Image: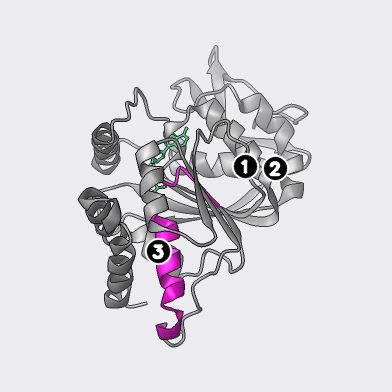
Amino acid sequence: MSDAFFRTLARDAAVRYKSAGRFAYHFAFGKLTGDPAFAHILARGLIPDRSRILDLGCGQGLMAALLQTARDRCGNWPAGMSLPPDPVAYCGIDVERRSIERAKHAVDGTAHFVCADIRSVPFDAADTVILLDVLHYLDYRAQEHLLRRVCDAMKAGGRMLLRVADESSTLRFRCTVAIDRVLMTLRGQRIDRLYCRPVAAWIRMLEAHGFHVTATPMSAGTPFANVLLCARYDAERGNEASPALRVHDDELPGSRSRTHARCFSRGIERACSVPVRDGRPQHLCRGDSGAR
Ligand SMILES: C[S@@+](CC[C@H](N)C(=O)[O-])C[C@H]1O[C@@H](n2cnc3c(N)ncnc32)[C@H](O)[C@@H]1O
């Protein structure tokens, strides 16, 4: 998909927000054209056709607006590119009322938007779950709880698209967090703390819930440290992994007194982060043969 074609799509998608006000329109255009994730997801066909989509922390519904605009352009779609997905259902959920109102202005058809807290609202059944720049607002326990509920809503083979920040000591990561805080303050949302993880830890958490994960850097042209995780759900793997996972629930990443270990759970080898006490790695995985 050429940059010029995507830019036209993004502009048309942004125009949908004009009736919701200047901010909504300019924000939509700026985010759709400046953030590489939207073009990447569309161009790579990462959302399967005929999906039931759950967009958690959907903001003003940019992905839904983009997909709807793309579907309207199907007759004029670049040759050789698979057609944009046509969701059978699209449910966007966000806790911020104004964003949900803007989404409702911009998107119609099969999409519906709900103002609610994703930590507690019941989820519809879904094949594709989208979580772009959201998970780090939930504390670590809530992240795990949310993933368990996503797994319950999804059948095997379902997929999740997550965009996360890769925590590190780099300037890029600090910049990501600083700009995130400014944007949330401008939205009137107070955040005391963000719950980030290094990308390897995000992947470990998803794998422990039964996902196969591929990671793609997603910061091109921006000062951010963002990564797109494409996670395919394998229910059987999830059942295997869950006992060990629960033991890790209350272990917060980032603690200095931790070390890496190879753990074995029911024959599956995993990279684990385990706490160190009295200079010795403490083994956490229930039923395992020990940290090595
Ligand atoms: C950085 S924005 C991303 C919006 C959208 N995913 C996108 O990429 O355009 C994060 C969104 O998550 C929402 N959010 C944060 N915590 C939430 C919660 N507990 N329940 C629902 N939405 C939440 C915020 O209101 C905000 O709209």
- The quadrant in which the N terminus is found is bottom left
Identify the residue shown where x is 62% and y is 45%.
Answer: 207
Q: Which residue is mark 3?
A: 66
Identify the residue shown where x is 26% and y is 31%.
Answer: 185
Residue 96 location, quadrant = top left
- Residue 3, compared with residue 214, is above or below; it is below
Which of label 3 and label 2 is nearer to you? Answer: 3
Name the secondary structure under disc 3: helix
- The quadrant in which the C terminus is found is top right
Identify the residue shown where x is 26% and y is 38%.
Answer: 183
The boundaries of the magenta stretch are 54-76
Q: Looking at the image, which is closer to me, 211 or 106?
A: 106
Most common secondary structure along the magenta stretch: helix
Comes first in the chain, label 2 or label 1: 1
Residue 184 picture location, percent across and down: 30, 35
Q: On the rendering, which quadrant does ligand 1 occupy?
A: top left
Counting other residues with Cα less than 10 Å from the Cα at mark 2, is it few (<14), some (14-19), or many (20 or more)? some
Residue 271 location, quadrant = top right
Q: Which residue is mark 1?
A: 123
Q: CA distance from mark 3 to mark 2?
A: 27 Å
Q: Looking at the image, which is closer to me, 139 or 62?
A: 62
Q: Do we see residue 197 in this rendering? A: no
